Image (cartoon, rainbow, N blue to C red):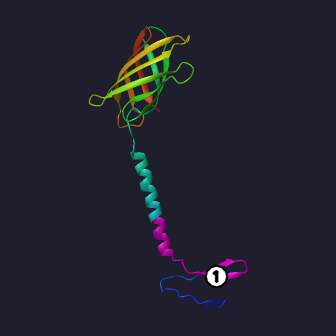
């Protein structure tokens, strides 16, 4: 019996501890450190397993934000920024998000890891231009994979290299 006259049946493997509520002390009959440690370890392992699964799910190799440069055969370099997504059928996105942006469509030949891009965007003066890019996807196992190849925008042609952010 405790101080209040209540009797508790405590299994032999349990440690009887008391906690205070106001001025009264009440027994905490569910305190078993070995069971609590096992539960904490189980929760920790489950959280680590869930985190590992989250990092393992990479998805489509082209999905994400990409940045890089287009180096024309003559003239200054220009920056390339792409945001690509995959809807289980098509690879689409935005080329150069902002006032000069345009929708982009891409295809991937997974056997050769070749990528083809087509977009209708705007040049620096705001005039419409058609953009075509063909490149090879490299460092596929890396998060920061790259695509290098040929790029044509308007009348300019040259090389490009972009890296996934």
Is residue 131 toward the left or the right of residue 31 in the image? left
Q: Would you say residue 23 sits in the magenta stretch?
A: yes
Across and down, in percent, residue 116 comes to 35, 22
Please name the residue shown 47% across and 83% down the image: 13
Q: Within the image, what quadrant is residue 72 found in?
A: top left
Callout 1: 10 Å neighbours few (<14), some, many (20+)?
A: some
Q: Within the image, what quadrant is residue 130 found in?
A: top left
Q: Is residue 94 above or below residue 34?
A: above
- In this rendered view, identify the residue nearer to me: 152 or 91: 91
Please name the residue shown 51% across and 13% down the image: 123
Across and down, in percent, residue 93 comes to 46, 27
Please name the residue shown 47% across and 62% down the image: 43
Please name the residue shown 56% across and 23% down the image: 98
Q: Would you say residue 140 sits in the magenta stretch?
A: no
Q: Secondary structure at mark 1?
A: strand
Tag 1 residue: 26
Across and down, in percent, residue 58 comes to 39, 41
Q: Is residue 74 above or below residue 70?
A: above
Q: Is residue 103 above or below residue 10?
A: above
- In this rendered view, identify the residue nearer to me: 101 or 38: 101
Residue interval drawn in magenta? 17-41
């Amino acid at each position: 019996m405790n101080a209040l006259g209540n009797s508790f049946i405590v299994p032999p493997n349990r440690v009887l501890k008391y906690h205070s509520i106001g001025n009264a002390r009440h027994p905490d009959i569910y305190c078993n450190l070995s069971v609590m440690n096992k539960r904490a370890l189980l929760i920790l392992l489950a959280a680590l397993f869930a985190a590992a699964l989250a990092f393992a799910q990479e998805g489509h190799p082209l999905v994400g934000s990409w940045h890089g440069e287009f180096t024309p055969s003559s003239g200054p370099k220009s920056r390339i920024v792409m945001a690509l997504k995959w809807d289980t059928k098509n690879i689409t996105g935005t080329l150069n998000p902002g006032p000069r942006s345009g929708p982009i469509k891409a295809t991937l030949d997974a056997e050769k890891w070749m990528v083809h891009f087509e977009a209708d965007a705007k040049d620096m003066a705001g005039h419409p231009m058609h953009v075509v890019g063909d490149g090879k996807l490299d460092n596929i196992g890396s998060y920061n994979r790259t695509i290098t190849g040929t790029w044509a925008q308007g009348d300019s042609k040259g090389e490009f290299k972009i890296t996934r952010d």
